[in-house]
Image (cartoon, grey):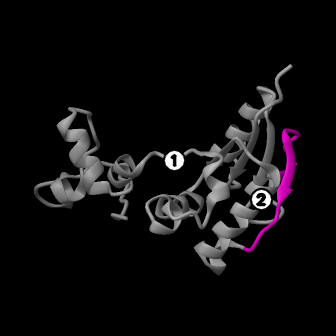
């Protein structure tokens, strides 16, 4: 009999995080988690094996990543899944850094880290680049306010405004 996969899921929302935890748990994976906020309803999922605590990411991404690396050394996860931007961004920076290539976080190399890859991340994290890629691939997108000619009277409601990030 093969041993179940050990997966480390990072996040805490009731959408992507909880969906990932439940899906993996139903497949028989051992699911440990790292949640950014205490006392979140997602923590009560029956599929969570262990809820780890390390220094909050707000105290610095490098310190936080060292905490994740320590957990990886101790528990030997097969897969690490960051489920939100606050977890994904430090991993994306780490994977592209000389520190990762030089082995300062060797324990993280033992696991597969679920990231989109540098090129894809660069496109989907920048709204202008995402729009450009969609246009090149003939993917329909909503009209943009800066692309709307004329006055406010030309706009139809409901209207959603979202700043560029």
Instruction: Give yes or no for contact between labels 1 and 2 (Cβ–Cβ under 8 Å).
Output: no
The residue depicted at 67 percent of the width and 47 percent of the height is 17
CA distance for labels 1 and 2: 19 Å
* Front label number (1 vs 2): 2
Q: Can residue 36 be seen in this view?
A: no
Which quadrant is home to the C terminus? bottom left
* Residue under numbered circle 2: 71
Residue 65: quarter of image? bottom right
Looking at the picture, does residue 59 appear above or below residue 71?
below
Q: Which of marks 1 and 2 is nearer the N terminus?
A: 2
The residue depicted at 59 percent of the width and 72 percent of the height is 61
Left or right: 122 in relation to 48: left
Which quadrant is home to the N terminus? top right
78 and 39: which is toward the camera: 78
The residue depicted at 54 percent of the width and 57 percent of the height is 88
Where residue 79 appears, as percent x and y from the top left, is 67, 42
Looking at the picture, does residue 142 appear above or below residue 105?
above
* Residue under numbered circle 1: 115
Looking at the picture, does residue 46 appear above or below residue 53?
above
What's drawn in magenta, residue-wise?
43-55
The residue depicted at 70 percent of the width and 41 percent of the height is 78
Where residue 98 appears, as percent x and y from the top left, is 45, 67
118 and 157: which is toward the camera: 118
**For mark 1, does the 10 Å Cα neighbourhood hold few (<14), some (14 to 19), or many (20 or more) residues?**
some
Where residue 157 appears, as percent x and y from the top left, is 33, 49
């Amino acid at each position: 009999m093969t041993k179940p996969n050990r997966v480390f899921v990072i996040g805490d929302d009731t959408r992507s995080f909880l969906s990932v935890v439940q899906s993996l748990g139903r497949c028989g994976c051992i699911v440990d988690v790292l949640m950014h906020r205490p006392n979140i309803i997602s923590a009560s999922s029956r599929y969570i094996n262990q809820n780890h605590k390390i220094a909050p990411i707000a105290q610095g991404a490098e310190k936080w990543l060292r905490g994740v690396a320590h957990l990886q050394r101790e528990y030997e996860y097969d897969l690490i899944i960051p489920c939100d931007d606050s977890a994904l961004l430090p991993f994306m920076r780490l994977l592209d850094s000389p520190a990762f290539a030089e082995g300062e976080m060797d324990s993280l190399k033992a696991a597969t880290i679920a990231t989109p890859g540098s090129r894809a991340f660069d496109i989907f994290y920048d709204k202008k680049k995402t729009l450009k890629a969609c246009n090149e691939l003939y993917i329909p997108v909503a009209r943009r306010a800066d692309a709307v000619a004329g006055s406010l009277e030309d706009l139809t409601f409901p209207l959603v405004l979202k700043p560029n990030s």
